[in-house]
Image: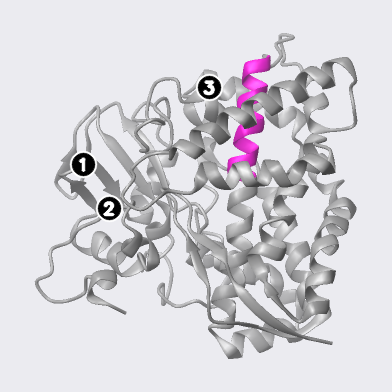
Amino acid sequence: MTQENTQETAGCPLHFDHYDYALQDDPYPVYARLRREAPLYHNEEHDFWVMSRHRDIHKAFRTDGVYSNKMGVSLDASAWNPQAHVVMSFLGMDPPEQTRLRKLVSRGFTPKRVAGMESQIRRLCNLYLEPALRRGSFDWIVDFAGKFPMDVISELLGVPPADRDELRRLADLLVHREHGLRDVPPVGFEASMALFSYYGDLIAERRRRPGDDLVTALLTTEGDDGDRMTDGELTAFLFLMVVAGNETTTKLLGNAVHNLTRHPEQLAAVFADASLVSPWIEETLRYDASSQLLARHTLEDVTVDGVTCPAGSQLLLNIGSANHDEQVFAESEEYDVFRDRDELAKHIAFGGGRHFCLGANLARLEANIALEELVSRCRTIETLPGAQRFYSANVRGFSSLPVTVALR
């Protein structure tokens, strides 16, 4: 690794900027320095703070009235504002508004609905996986992992198959960050407007012609007092599903294959025993979380080890660092699918408390089906040269991951 990537050279100043491509290539050595040297770090140039230890972030997720979501969860210049909820749904809200909306969504987006999609998810998985495996060598992201999760979300929402490629393209444009740009690129703004327009039309269509899909369920879901989601709230939630539900699962699948293939003994074990697929997923979530950083607006002073982040600040909760905390995870910098299950359960890749990800069940189901199908059909998988990272302000993963497989 280069000095620029690791910053481990004696005397090298500690510097953290999540928009830096070099950091995104290998952030974990810098995360370790943050936990050790500055668990509450201040980037003076751009005036934001970073919290990096597991115990501090675990507490933050469960502390009300201090770490506000009302400015959104990204420090992108255009995204950080009091109207964040318009595009990011309840991720841009605090209680009681957040509680109300999460409760309404939960009544439509139930574990039973997710579990009932298993056969549909498996069909969509094999729609892309089978032809890719027959070729022997293919791009795990471009040919499979970049398509499958978006189709699952689209199936859930009732999006016609003919529209799915375009929605996937728009979602990619929205999340990607260009080098040197600390905001959504112009093409991303155009993509967001196109997505909002599309989902607005979909909602109108479901009002005229209800279907057996999540959009229809949410249109008819009522709270205890007869309250329902407005069209604006529903559009924002659908937009969130595309960004959070699609991109993060794509990155999880890519990170899982990338990391396992770097450990031949673990690779052989997983492909010999499908019961290891679940811990393979959980260790990937811990070691290389898709969502690395979540922003908060501090409503009160926050002090860690004598250092104070003042009220009114931009604060990043560094989930990627927390999941490598040596105070919680043994050999925390090592990727190990045999890691103790009780220890694995402590990762916070899906957040915590009232911020726990509502899509966690769906993400886990998709990943289990995809990787079980891979293991059941192949003797092994190997990554090839040419992998390309996906650069984003919050999400970590690949845009391209060439692989070759040996079928059973």
Mark 2 or 1, nearer chain start? 2
The local secondary structure at tag 2 comes to loop
Say if mark 3 contacts mark 1, CB within 8 Å.
Answer: no
Residue 194 x/y as whole percent: 62, 30
**Image side of residue 389 versus residue 65, left or right:** right
Q: Residue at x 37, y 37 (%)?
A: 76
Is residue 234 covered in magenta?
yes
Is residue 97 covered in magenta?
no
Residue 370 x/y as whole percent: 75, 65
Cα distance in 3D space between marks 3 and 1: 25 Å
Q: Residue at x 71, y 48 (%)?
A: 150
**Image side of residue 352 versus residue 74, left or right:** right
Q: Nearer the viewer, residue 288 or 25?
A: 25
Q: Amino acid at mark 1?
A: His
Mark 1 = which residue? 46
Q: Amino acid at mark 3?
A: Val
Mark 3 = which residue? 86
**Image side of residue 343 versus residue 149, left or right:** left
Vertical arrangement, residue 88 with respect to residue 326, above or below: above
Say if mark 2 contacts mark 1, CB within 8 Å.
Answer: yes
Q: What range of the chain is rendered magenta?
A: 231-245
Mark 2 = which residue? 17
Q: Main secondary structure of the magenta part?
A: helix
Residue 196 x/y as whole percent: 63, 26
Vertical arrangement, residue 69 with respect to residue 331, above or below: above
**Image side of residue 98 versus residue 218, left or right:** left
Q: Amino acid at mark 2?
A: Asp
The local secondary structure at tag 1 comes to loop
Cα distance in 3D space between marks 3 and 2: 27 Å
Q: Residue at x 78, y 35 (%)?
A: 157
Mark 3 or 2, nearer chain start? 2
Q: Which mark is residue 142?
A: none
